[in-house]
Amino acid sequence: MRYSAFSLAANALRAKPRWPRVWRDAAPKPAYDVVIVGGGGHGLATAYYLAKAFGVANVAVLERGAIGLGNAGRNTTIIRSNYREPGNEAFYEFSMKLWEGLEQDFNYNAMVSQRGVLNLYHSDAQRDAFARRGNAMILHGADAQLLDQAGVRKLAPFLDFENARFPIQGGLLQRRGGTARHDAVVWGYARGADQRGVDIIQNCEVTGLRIVGGQVMGVETTRGPIRAGKVGLAVAGNSSRLGAMAGLRLPIESYPLQAMVSEAIKPLIPGVITFGAGHFYISQSDKGGLVFGGDIDPYPSYAQRGNLPVIEEVCEAGMSLMPMIGRLRVLRMWAGVTDMTMDGSPIIDTTPVRGLYFNGGWCYGGFKATPASGWCFAHLLARDQPHPTATAFRLDRFASGAVIDENGQGAQANLH
Ligand SMILES: Cc1cc2nc3c(=O)[nH]c(=O)nc-3n(C[C@H](O)[C@H](O)[C@H](O)COP(=O)(O)OP(=O)(O)OC[C@H]3O[C@@H](n4cnc5c(N)ncnc54)[C@H](O)[C@@H]3O)c2cc1C
């Protein structure tokens, strides 16, 4: 069924609305051309673009639980393309362009809202670094505006400009950045992939990879073995576990990352705002809650839960930026498990095992990458060639030294 204003109005008038299932509950077949492990945003986007753009529809997405309950459904929903490094910026700007047409493309309301992302700076040196980053963005076709203090005051007069320990001097603004509804992104890709023949198989955990003579032959799952010519891993925080099944030791550490939401208030925060003197980012959901987060918890873990000291630290950073939020109650907090690379940049590449492809290492920022990650991984799986915007995301860069050192994004951001 195609969604439209007409179908919405027709169903609103029917005594028994006719909304069919959005995707099939597929059972595993014995074999597929491509098996994708991981039913998060990246796995589902990969399946969608494989079927839609590359003509490969004999595809299964295997998810150990229900789709979208990993990081895809736990993030703070920020989308932006304000990266500095050449290897990253073109890719994230490609993703931004895909976001801009996504809802029309998959005919689903993902609540993409380009409400702006403002990164604050608090020193002359930081202003210079942000100016450099803004120029890199503009060179790659993205938008960037360097604001002085008066410019920031106009956008966010509630920030503490007078008594702050780290006075706000200005900010780097990307107006095309913003937020999107994370669950809807997952559901939109799932629906689009399913409509094109992809099997989305939930409650199907991959427990092993079948590899014979250096070539992948398929996967072992809790619902039986499945043969496949190609297997793509898109399992975010579980990358090292799945890599180990193929004997790979990946340059990745997994850490909990928490997010918090406050009780709902009237519209206050106009877009996304990030603190430049600590790790803190905040936006306001359409329901009115302030959604915010900061650093990863400082120890590796596969548990989808974090600890109180980090919540305290994040709230302190928020208070030093906008002291009035101290009067709000935090309603909920939760955590996901992020796969952190050492240079803060992702990996989309083939592996030493023929037919086994890897997508991971998204650190703090894989949600915004979802469309381009799916497209580029599909490109690699279909053509065995990296997409032009993802050529730098090589697995061997940690051996060759060709790292993409994106300041403040990796597992040890303090060491960059
Ligand atoms: C609290 C938090 C805030 C964040 N905020 C932002 C943000 O504002 N902006 C941004 O760009 N990014 C953000 N991120 C990062 C972003 O959410 C992730 O980088 C991105 O979602 C990862 O890709 P994914 O959606 O495919 O991952 P996931 O949704 O985690 O998908 C991986 C899937 O693989 C499945 N899986 C694992 N092992 C197996 C197995 N053996 N068999 C079958 N299935 C398996 C998991 O169950 C999971 O569903 C945030 C992350 C967190 C945790």
Image (cartoon, helix red, strand yellow):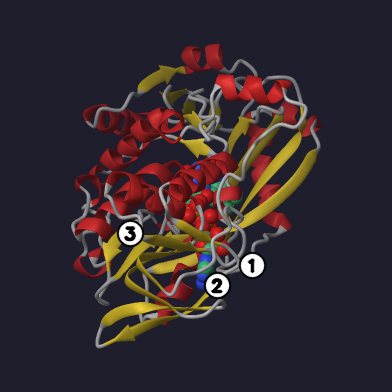
Q: Give the secondary structure at mark 2.
A: loop
Q: CA distance from mark 2 to mark 1?
A: 17 Å
User: Callout 2: few (<14), some (14-19), or many (20+) C-alpha neighbours within 10 Å?
Assistant: some
**Hey, which residue is sitting farthest bottom in the picture?**
213
Residue wearing tag 2: 205
Pointer 3 with pointer 1, Cβ within 8 A = no
Q: Which mark is residue 303?
A: 1
Seen from the viewer's position, the closer of residues 95 and 410 is: 95
**2 vs 3, front mark:** 2
* Amino acid type at mark 3: Ile
- Residue type at mark 2: give it: Glu
What is the distance, in whole Å, between disc 3 and disc 1 at their CAs? 23 Å
Residue 401 found in image quarter: bottom left
Distance, label 2 to label 3, CA atoms, is 23 Å
Is 306 situated left or right of 202 in this image? right
Q: Which residue is mark 3?
A: 347
Quadrant where the image shows the C terminus: bottom left
Which callout, 2 or 3, points at the residue further toward the start of the chain?
2
Residue 338 seen in this snapshot: no
Q: Amino acid at mark 1?
A: Ala
